[in-house]
Structure formats: structure tokens, C-alpha cells
Image (cartoon, helix red, strand yellow):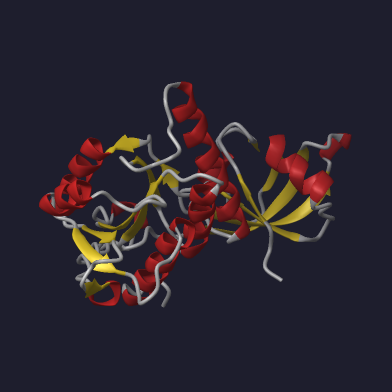
Amino acid sequence: MTAPVFVLTPDTLEPAGAAHRAESGDLLVLTGAEARHAVTVRRLRAGERVDLVDGEGLRLVCEVTEPGTGGAKDRLGVRVTERVEEPAPPIRLALVQALAKGGRDEQAVETATEVGADLVVPWQSSRCVSVWNGPKAAKGRGRWQATAHEAAKQARRARVPEVLEPVSTKRLVAWVHDAVDAGGAVLVLHEEGMAPVGGAALPEPAAASATGDPGQSAEAPLLAVVVGPEGGIAPEETAALEAAGASTVRLGPHVMRTASAGPVALAVLAQRAGLWG
């Protein structure tokens, strides 16, 4: 069975600054909510393996030394057995998800994270039944980010997708233009699309660093899919997205719900792009 994953932050790993310099043999203490979950919910025991990740590619493979360090339920003592810095992907997968009712949008975020999405963009399209206004927008974004956080842990990922602020169609059009201009590709899933998603042109992967340093690679282009709400994408929105450089594609012979269309498309694209190799 694969080891459980817990996300560290500079404020929840002791000693201070340990994530930047931790090496095999170092003794660390994870604190806070993640440690409490490890101790009281997962009930980890001394000698068990656990992976601590920073959400940006760092993975510390560890062995539990003292669950509930000092009798505190929110402290987990570990010994580092290996430090792994996973390189950034050569192509970044992105999900542009229209807001949906009944939690279907959060389901899409969850599954897309498990598939490998690196970025999530909430979209307030014209036909969305769900509306995020004022404080509701910040709350909704926080809920999506928490969903991505938990899904990344479930998938044992070292990288947690970033959820951007919700965008209107006007702002999405500008985002699409910038993504395509930077060498990326944006695919709008539409039941009336003529071209299959499996035949869409993919962006050129980012060149790896000559020194082998994952932090020195060129910025990876985006490969994004745009998913509309239950009522579909309005014709004028489709036209605006196409004018910005997006391509309209058909996912398959059947119409999928907004919760499943994006993750399925990303899975097809991840396989084609070699991200699952």
C-alpha cells in the first residue's frame, strides 16, 4: 500500500526552515491540522512510512518516530529517509470549470486533481445557475482549493493544483488569449464540436534545463479544457473563446455531465501528452 501523504508548510514543520534543507537522517516534527489527522485519524505508528510534501514538488519520504510527540495530538515526529524534488511537468494541465449546482463543480475539481490538473479556473458563465457574488466568491474559491488539497493527498501527489479567482467570460477570454499567445492550447468541450479531442493539436513541451535542475526549466505551456454549465456554453461565449485562440472539440459520442467531462478530457490529453508515461 502506498504511503499516506501530508502537506507541510513553513509554519507547520519544525525546526523552522527544515523543508529547504532536510536530508536523509534528519529528525523533523510536523505540527498543526495535518499532524492531528495523522495521529488521531490515521493513527500512524512508529516505524510506518509517511510522505511530507510542500505542494510544489518537494517530497520528504519519512519514517514515523513518535506519533503525538510529547503527548500532543497535533505533533508528529518523523525521520527523513529520502528527499525527492519532483520536476515540474513539461505541459501544465488546466481545468476551466463553469460553476454548477449540486456540488458537481467540486466533484470535477476533485477528479481533475486526481487525473493531474495543475491549475483550476472557476468560470461564471452566462448560463450558470450557481452565482458567486461578493464574499461568496472567496468562500467558493476556498472550498474548491480545499477540495484540490484533499484530492492531491488522496492521489499521493507532491503538487497541489492552484485554484484561481473566479472569472467572468470577458476575463476568461483574456486569459485564453494570454495562454495561447504563450504557446499553450485551450480546448472548449462542446457537444456540437466537429473535431475530436483526441486529435487536437498539443502545445510543445517545455525544454528541460541543461543542468538538470527542475527549478531552472522553461515555463511549461498550458493545456486547458473549458467545461460549460449544465445549460451549455452560450453561442456568443463559444465565438468569443474561439476568437481568442481556443479550439472547439467534441469529447466523444455521448454527452457527459459537467462533473465528468473535464476530468475525462484531461485524462485523454494527459495520456496523449506523455504525462502518464
Residue 208, quarter of the rendered image: bottom left
16 versus 108 height, above or below: above
> Which quarter of the figure is the C terminus placed in?
bottom left
Q: Is residue 182 visible?
A: no
Quadrant of the image containing the N terminus:
bottom right
For the point 67% across and 68% down, the residue is 2
Q: Is residue 21 left or right of residue 126?
A: right
The part of the image, by quadrant, that contains residue 24 is: bottom right
Residue 128, given in percent of the width and then of the height, sits at: 39, 42
Q: Position of residue 133 (x, y in %)?
A: 42, 25
Q: Nearer the viewer, residue 19 or 8?
A: 8
Point 43% across, 65% down: residue: 256
Q: Using residue 201 as the reference point, say whether residue 48 is left or right of it.
A: right
Residue 93 on image: x %, y %: 35, 59
Which residue, as the protein is rendered here, is positioned at the far front?
Answer: 231
Residue 190, image x, y percentages = 29, 62
Q: Residue furthest top?
A: 134
Q: Residue furthest right?
A: 71
* 145 over 194 or under it: above or below: above
Q: Is residue 221 visible?
A: yes
Residue 25 shown left or right of residue 267 in the figure: right
9 or 163, nearer to the observer = 163
Q: How many marks?
A: 0
Q: Residue at x 81, y 48 (%)?
A: 41
